[in-house]
Structure formats: structure tokens, C-alpha cells
Image (cartoon, rainbow, N blue to C red):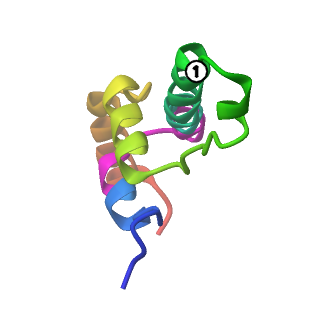
Amino acid sequence: MIASNELRFKRLNKEMEGYSGSDVRLACKEAAMCAMRKAFTALETTKKSSELETLDLDVLTNADVLKAVVRTKPSTCHSLLDRYRVWHKEFGSA
């Protein structure tokens, strides 16, 4: 059984199909910023310094990563990828 805070890599892999390594990196940075934005909001709304001691930062969740995937699109063009596959099928090595 997968713990609620574990990333589901098979699902994320499917969602990020067509992403380059750089695109995945950008999506991961955006996901990390989702957690940071929650922390910044908590810091801005906290009135007492004693409340900051009990501030609990969230772990990165699947929802954070999926939101980031929606916000970041792959830089690779699917039509170029399809053209490459056709070329590779005809001229590529076996």
C-alpha cells in the first residue's frame, strides 16, 4: 500500500510523457514552490512568533506535482517527435 505522502511515479510518468529532462526539472521546481507558497502564506498570516515554532511544513504531494505539470508544458513538440519516430523506423539502427 502506498502511503498518502508517497509520490506515484507511474502516474507522474504517464502525465509527463513527452517532457524532456529539463521540462521534468522545471515541473519539480514548480511543485516545490507549491509547498513553499503554503509556507509563505502561513508566515504572512501568523501573528505571534510562538506560532512559528509550531509551523509544520507540508511534504511534497502528488497533487503538488500534478498542479505543476498542468502549469508547465513540455518543450518538445509532439509533431516533431512523431516525425522522428517515422524517420527512426525507416533509417534508424536496429
Position in image of residue 88 (x %, y %): 40, 50
Residue 90 in sight in this render: yes
- In the rendered view, tell whether residue 75 sits above or below residue 45: below
Q: Secondary structure at mark 1?
A: loop
Q: Which residues are magenta?
A: 14-26
Displayed quadrant of residue 70: top left
- In the rendered view, tell whether residue 6 sits above or below residue 59: below
The residue that appears at 42% across and 74% down in the rendered structure is 3
User: In this view of the protein, which residue sits in the foreground, 21 or 44?
Assistant: 44
Residue 28 is left or right of residue 6, and the answer is: right
Residue under numbered circle 1:
46
User: In this view of the protein, which residue sits in the foreground, 1 or 19?
Assistant: 1
User: In this view of the protein, which residue sits in the foreground, 60 or 8?
Assistant: 60
Q: How would you classify the magenta stretch by its main secondary structure?
A: helix
- In the rendered view, tell whether residue 40 sits above or below residue 34: above
The residue that appears at 58% across and 29% down in the rendered structure is 39
Position in image of residue 51 (x %, y %): 65, 33
